Image: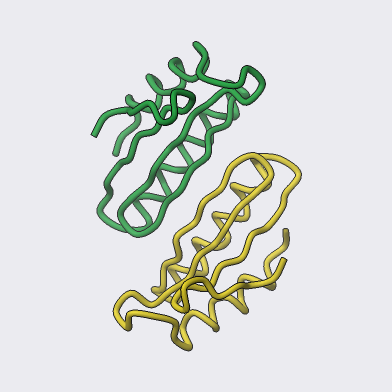
Chain colours: A yellow, B green
C-alpha cells in the first residue's frame, strides 16, 4: 500500500514485515530519519506490521516536510 | 496513568517522555522484553508519548503472559 491522505491533514502508510523484530528495526530507521530532519511522525507497530503517520502540527496540516520525509521513508529497506 | 483493560481483552497503558528520542528508547526496551518472553505488544508512539497494548491473540484475550509483561514494563525507566 502507498501513502494515503487521511482527513486532509495526515499522510499515512502501512508496511509489512516478517516478524516483530523486522518491524522494530524499520521503526528505528524511521526514527533516525525523523531526528535528522527534526520532523517526527507518529508510529504504530506490532508483530509484522508498522504504520507511519506524518503531519506538520505547527502548520495544522501537510507541508513539504511531510512529503520529503515520506519519500525518504519509501527508500528504507522493509 | 496505570494499565487499563480495554474491551475486556486488552491491557493498555500510556507513558510520557521528554521528547521523541525518549519515547523511542523506551519502545526499544519494551521490544527487548517482548523478544525475551516471545510475547509481542502493539506499540504506538510519537513525540513525548508511547502507548503499549497487550493481549494474547492465541487465547482471544488476556492471560498471565500479559500481566507478567505489563509488570516488567512497569519497571522500565521512563
The residue under the point 49% across, 24% down is: B9
Relative image position of residue A36 (x, y in whole percent): 46, 73
A20 left or right of B17 in image: right
Q: Is residue B58 above or below residue B30?
A: above
Q: Quadrant of the C terminus of chain A?
A: bottom right
The residue under the point 55% across, 75% down is: A5
B59 left or right of A36 in image: right
Outermost residue on the top side: it is B64
The residue under the point 62% across, 55% down is: A26
Q: Is residue A5 above or below residue A48?
A: below
B66 left or right of A72 in image: left
B57 left or right of A78 in image: left
Q: Quadrant of the N terminus of chain A?
A: bottom right
Relative image position of residue B35 (x, y in whole percent): 60, 29
Q: Is residue B54 above or below residue B68?
A: below
Relative image position of residue A16 (x, y in whole percent): 71, 53
The residue under the point 39% across, 42% down is: B51
The number of callouts visible is 0
Q: Nearer the viewer, residue A62 or A8?
A: A8
Outermost residue on the bottom side: it is A64
Relative image position of residue A23 (x, y in whole percent): 64, 48
Amino acid at each position: 500500500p502507498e501513502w494515503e491522505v487521511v482527513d486532509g491533514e495526515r499522510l499515512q502508510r502501512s508496511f509489512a514485515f516478517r516478524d516483530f523484530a523486522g518491524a522494530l528495526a524499520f521503526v528505528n530507521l524511521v526514527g533516525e530519519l525523523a531526528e535528522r530532519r527534526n520532523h517526527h511522525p507518529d508510529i504504530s507497530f506490532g508483530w509484522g506490521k508498522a504504520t507511519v503517520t506524518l503531519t506538520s502540527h505547527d502548520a495544522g496540516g501537510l507541508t513539504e516536510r511531510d512529503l520529503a520525509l515520506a519519500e525518504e521513508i519509501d527508500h528504507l529497506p522493509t
